[in-house]
């Protein structure tokens, strides 16, 4: 899936940025990564507030093989198939993912800017 196809899916979501990373692509809004494209599939950021919704829809987490050979998963779950062809539905799911990304960002401690010198 190329960056233009991703932009088309999320055309109702507003201004997004797509950036290559680790063999896939990160999808950003307001400098927060809310989606991940890997292997031609789109995964959306989830958290404790949205996980059950994705699970109930039959979604699955993005997984990869760790250096130790064990499978690892991330807090990104497969976008429901129907949303790929419906920009309004994609925007609704993107809004959930953006909100989850904001909550995750808010939980991170602010970097100590004085340490930079």
Image: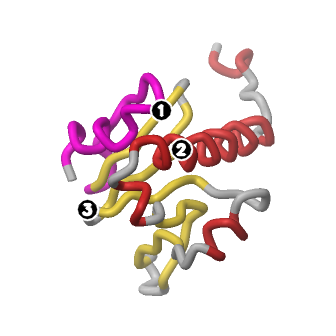
Measured along the vertical axis of the image, is residue 15 above or below residue 84?
above
Query: 10 or 64, which is in the foreground?
Result: 10
- Camera-nearest label, 2 or 3: 2
Q: Position of residue 101 (x, y in %)?
A: 64, 43
Residue located beneath label 3 in the image: 40
Residue range highlighted in magenta: 2-23
Q: Pointers 2 and 1 in contact (CB under 8 A)? A: yes
Q: Is residue 46 magenta?
A: no
Q: Pointers 1 and 3 in contact (CB under 8 A)? A: no
Residue 98, numbered label? none
Is residue 62 shown left or right of residue 99? left
Q: Residue furthest bottom?
A: 70
Residue located beneath label 2 in the image: 94
Q: Pointers 2 and 3 in contact (CB under 8 A)? A: no
Q: Which mark sits nearer the N-terminus, 2 or 1?
A: 1
Q: Residue at the location (45% across, 59% down)? A: 43
Residue located beneath label 1 in the image: 13
Q: Is residue 10 magenta?
A: yes
Is residue 72 shown left or right of residue 1? right
Circle 3 Cα neighbour tier, 10 Å, few/some/many (<14 / 14–19 / ≥20) = few
Q: Residue at the location (21% across, 37% down)? A: 4
- Camera-nearest label, 1 or 3: 1
Query: 75 or 15, which is in the foreground?
Result: 15
Q: Secondary structure at mark 1?
A: loop
Q: Secondary structure at mark 2?
A: helix
Q: Position of residue 23 (x, y in %)?
A: 26, 56
């Amino acid at each position: 899936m190329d960056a233009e196809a991703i932009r088309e899916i999320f055309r109702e979501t507003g201004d997004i940025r797509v950036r290559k990373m680790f063999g896939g692509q990160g999808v950003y809004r307001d400098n927060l990564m809310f989606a991940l494209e890997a292997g031609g599939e789109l995964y959306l950021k989830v958290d404790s507030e949205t996980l059950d919704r994705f699970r109930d829809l039959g979604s699955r987490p993005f997984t990869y093989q760790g250096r130790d050979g064990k499978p690892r998963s991330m807090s990104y779950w497969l976008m429901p198939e129907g949303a790929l062809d419906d920009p309004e539905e994609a925007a609704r799911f993107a809004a959930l993912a953006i909100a989850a990304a904001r909550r995750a960002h808010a939980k991170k401690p602010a970097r100590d800017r004085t340490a930079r010198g």
